[in-house]
Image: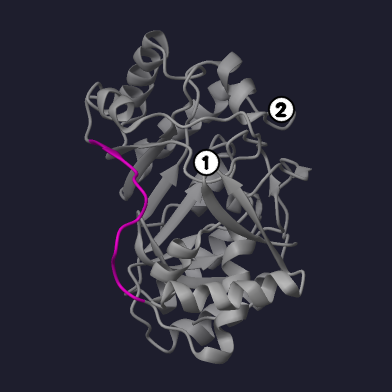
Amino acid sequence: MNMEKYLFGPVHSRRLGRSLGIDLIPYKTCSLNCVYCECGRTTELITVRKEYVPTEAVLAEINRYLSQQPQLDYVTFAGSGEPTLHSRIGEVVRFIKTNFPAYRVALLTNSTLLHLAELRAELQAVDLLLPSLDAPSEEIFQQINRPAAGIHLQDMIEGLIAFRQNYSGLIWLEIFIMPGLNDSEAAIKEFRKLVHRIKPDLVQLNTLDRPGAEQWVQPATRDQLIAIAAQFDCPGEIIARFQAGIKITAAENEVENTLLRIIKRRPSTVADLAETLGLAPQEIHKHLEVLVKRRQAYASTVEQRVFFRGYQ
């Protein structure tokens, strides 16, 4: 199990299989403050692109780890902020594709900076882009995503359309459905129009699964998502909780540090962590108790499910 500073995992992702994460942004540094974000409210709401972490240190970690030829489905730019804010992300992508071409690279992004031509150029070597689009109108965008000053929905849409025109990789567009905000008949009709213009390879519908930034956020039902998915012209799927898959083992003396790195980035249940690490739930619970006693982690209950988070 990886114990680097800027890499995390591998974890078993419900969308990407066995995924090694790269985190280029300090905790909750983002251009959006989404009401549903599992990492909590954004503390640094910003649009400035700069070198937030030392790129050379990131490249050194990637080189050390991938030189061991681990079994991975994807190397994924993700974490607890917006990866494209890092001004040298393109260099990191090129480093991986040049030195470790066997590995596929994925990028999770909130789409807010894709209107920048230089960023679109930097990301051409990415194999899979997973952008978000949660609103069909500026009013709903402000309600759900609460953007930084200067970020507008129309710019995001035009950026996605422009990226698709010159990009040969895959685009899986994620839409986060929030009942009462973006699930009306009119909203879905507008989403259909936008999807037709953006031309993603796949539409992935998501809804609340873990504690959001705001307590009032509620999930859509599976039946609602099925009905919405059926209305798109391109292939669509519902992102469910990840199922049993490849087990990832961790050495005994690394388990607590590994757990802490995971729950600092996303709230997780004992079952989630057991599946990710390939350990018995009782073993996971024992280590979580240690972290809670050390005041490194805490538990919260949402709809009768207990989630563990790491203190930042």
Taking depth in this image into account, of 270 and 62 the one nearest to the observer is 270
Q: Residue furthest top?
A: 186
In the picture shown, does residue 294 fall above or below 85?
A: below
Question: How far across and how far down the image is residue 10, in percent?
Answer: 45, 73
Q: Residue at x 62, y 33 (%)?
A: 35
Q: Nearer the viewer, mark 1 or mark 2?
A: 1
Upstream in sequence: badge 1 or badge 2:
2
Secondary structure type for disc 2: loop
Location of residue 214 by image quarter: top right
Q: Which residue is mark 2?
A: 150
- Range drawn in magenta: 236-247
Taking depth in this image into account, of 138 and 98 the one nearest to the observer is 138
Observer able to see residue 59: no
Secondary structure type for disc 1: loop
Question: How far across and how far down the image is residue 227, in percent?
Answer: 26, 23
The residue type indicated by label 1 comes to Glu
Q: Which residue is mark 1?
A: 303
Taking depth in this image into account, of 175 and 177 the one nearest to the observer is 177
The residue type indicated by label 2 comes to Gly
In the picture shown, does residue 95 fall above or below 202?
A: below
Q: Residue at x 70, y 69 (%)?
A: 292
Q: Residues within 10 Å of mark 1 (few under 14, many from 20)?
A: few
In the rendered structure, the answer to whether residue 140 lies left or right of residue 14 reads: right
Q: Residue at x 49, y 64 (%)?
A: 270
In the picture shown, does residue 7 fall above or below 183?
A: below
91 within the magenta span? no
Question: How far across and how far down the image is residue 81, in percent?
Answer: 64, 51
Most frequent secondary structure within the magenta stretch:
loop
Marks 1/2: CA–CA distance = 36 Å
In the picture shown, does residue 305 fall above or below 198?
A: below
